[in-house]
Amino acid sequence: MVKEVRENTLVLIKPDALKNSLTGYILSMLSEFHTGLHFAGTKIVSVSTLLAEEHYEEHRGKFFYPSLIEYITGRLHYPDEPWKRRVIAFVYQGPGAIKKIRDIAGPTNAHDARVQKPGCIRALGTVVPVKDDTGKFIGDRVDNLIHASANATDAEREIKLWFSPTDIPPYMRDYTAEVCDRHYYYKDAIISPTHVPGSIGFLAPGDLAWKSDLEALQLHLKGKKAPCSVNTVAAKYLINMKNED
């Protein structure tokens, strides 16, 4: 008998789902009863611009990118109520987790979801026209209620972006973590091992961090090319640490 391989996937319940009181419905659709999967981590996140830009890095420069950042940070749905701007993030874990969750979520475009897979989560989403500064229509933005990782590579990158190792129980933690042995401070996309005015500390000796993050930080301190940016590493460790207007 072949043992099934355990997978991890990131799920985000987005601001439009929260505003429309769909949290309970989505969680029931994703429950262990329907999926056979387990929660490995969950948190409520006030999504900073830094985190949003890192999450949607692949869309940077596209016409809908600015609107997408406003959407995931909650500014579009809660323009005058910043305390309501939040996302619920989950790590789901189990055999076939990525495909199971994406099948339940449905097609990315809400119109396609209603036609191709009525009853899926995204069938309740909307497609919003995006206009330029002159009011001219330039395309659509999809408000599709939920994010689900597309593949194992994306899942690892996204989980490491939204969750630190201590957000996930040890026996459910499938990515390598190490204990940090120095201080790291962040300011304006620059890191320093010592405090500089206006900087904020995000890792200290004794903190548990993803091994890949510590390796990237060490390369940045040496002025060498790293597999990810300083912002990518800092974004997760600064989650819910600082308010934005």
Image: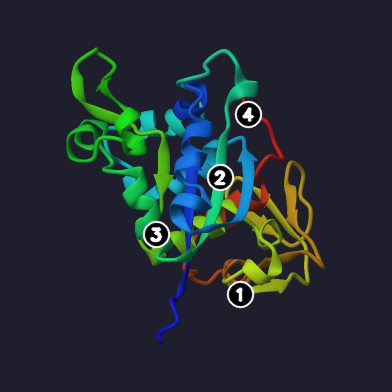
Taking the image as shown, residue 84 lies to the left or right of residue 120, namely right
The residue positioned 61% from the left and 39% from the top of the image is 45
Amino acid at circle 1: Thr
Report the mark closest to the observer, 1 or 2: 2
Which residue position is annotated with label 3?
Answer: 98
* Contact check, label 3 and label 2, Cβ < 8 Å: no
Taking the image as shown, residue 234 lies to the left or right of residue 106, namely right
Report the mark closest to the observer, 4 or 1: 1
Which residue position is annotated with label 2?
Answer: 89
Which residue position is annotated with label 4?
Answer: 244
Taking the image as shown, residue 136 lies to the left or right of residue 20, namely left
Amino acid at circle 4: Glu
Amino acid at circle 3: Ile
Disc 3 is placed on an element classified as helix
| Real-space CA distance between mark 4 and mark 3, rounded to the nearest whole angstrom | 32 Å
Dot placed on the residue nearer the N-terminal end, 1 or 2: 2
Report the mark closest to the observer, 3 or 1: 3
